[in-house]
Amino acid sequence: MSLQEIIKPDGVLCNATARSKKHCLEILSELLVRNIPDIASDDIFECLIGRERLGCTGLDKGAAFPHCRIKGIEESVAVLIKLSEPVDFESSDGEPVDLVVGMIVPEEVDDQHRQDVNLITELLADEGLRASLREMNSSKDLYNTLINSAEKTCQANCA
């Protein structure tokens, strides 16, 4: 799937305010249900919390990738939040997080879903992209920056 199929424009929130990691996961859950109204945000939240208990999803350098498997969906769905103030995500580098991509995948994960997860982690590992995302001041600009970077990454890797 392309990133545009995984993250929709209404799944991006710029300058969100989260009091804590838990509050950030609540915001992610509410954003994720925008494209899958048959799933309750509380169910997504509980799955994200459960996944965090297995191990921190902080990727270091101020980025995090909370994700989990959800029953009742067929495709990967993700959202992006840029926080106005970083929160402690218990990342291994100790750095607070201000860029968060939340993702849900089907309960039965296949190769395509694994590729979707790899795409997100590759993008979040890109120092230049993280810096560009941090410069954005609107949800629209944040979305466009992410999508344009993904297209450039694919062109470079798929050529």
Image (cartoon, helix red, strand yellow):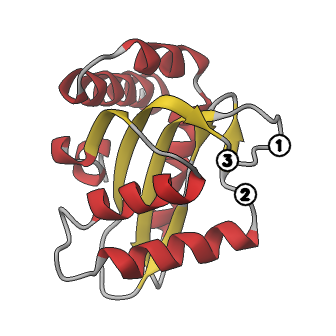
Q: Nearer the viewer, mark 3 or mark 2?
A: 3
Residue 109 visible in the displayed image: no
Image position of 127 (left or right of 7): right
The answer to which of marks 3 and 2 sits earlier in the sequence is 2
Q: Residue furthest front?
A: 19
Name which residue lies at 57% across and 32% down.
Answer: 86
Mark 2 residue crowding within 10 angstroms, few (<14) / some (14–19) / many (20+) = some
Q: Relative to 65, does residue 46 appear above or below in the rendering? A: below
Q: CA distance from mark 1 to mark 3?
A: 9 Å
Image position of 122 (left or right of 42): right
Residue 29, image x, y percentages: 37, 64
Q: Amino acid at mark 3?
A: Phe
Label 3 close to label 2 by CB (< 8 Å): yes
Q: Amino acid at mark 2?
A: Cys
Residue 10, image x, y percentages: 17, 46
- Of residues 88 and 138, the one nearer the viewer is 88
Name which residue lies at 45% across and 22% down.
Answer: 156
Residue 105, image x, y percentages: 42, 70
The answer to which of marks 2 and 1 sits earlier in the sequence is 2
Name which residue lies at 58% across and 71% down.
Answer: 49
Q: Quadrant of the C terminus?
A: top left
- Of residues 33 and 24, the one nearer the viewer is 24
Q: Amino acid at mark 1?
A: Ser
Element class at badge 2? loop
Which residue corresponds to mark 3?
Answer: 89
Residue 63 visible in the displayed image: yes
Which residue corresponds to mark 2?
Answer: 56
Which residue corresponds to mark 1?
Answer: 92
Residue 62, image x, y percentages: 63, 31
Q: CA distance from mark 3 to mark 2?
A: 7 Å
Element class at badge 3? loop
Name which residue lies at 31% across and 70% down.
Answer: 75
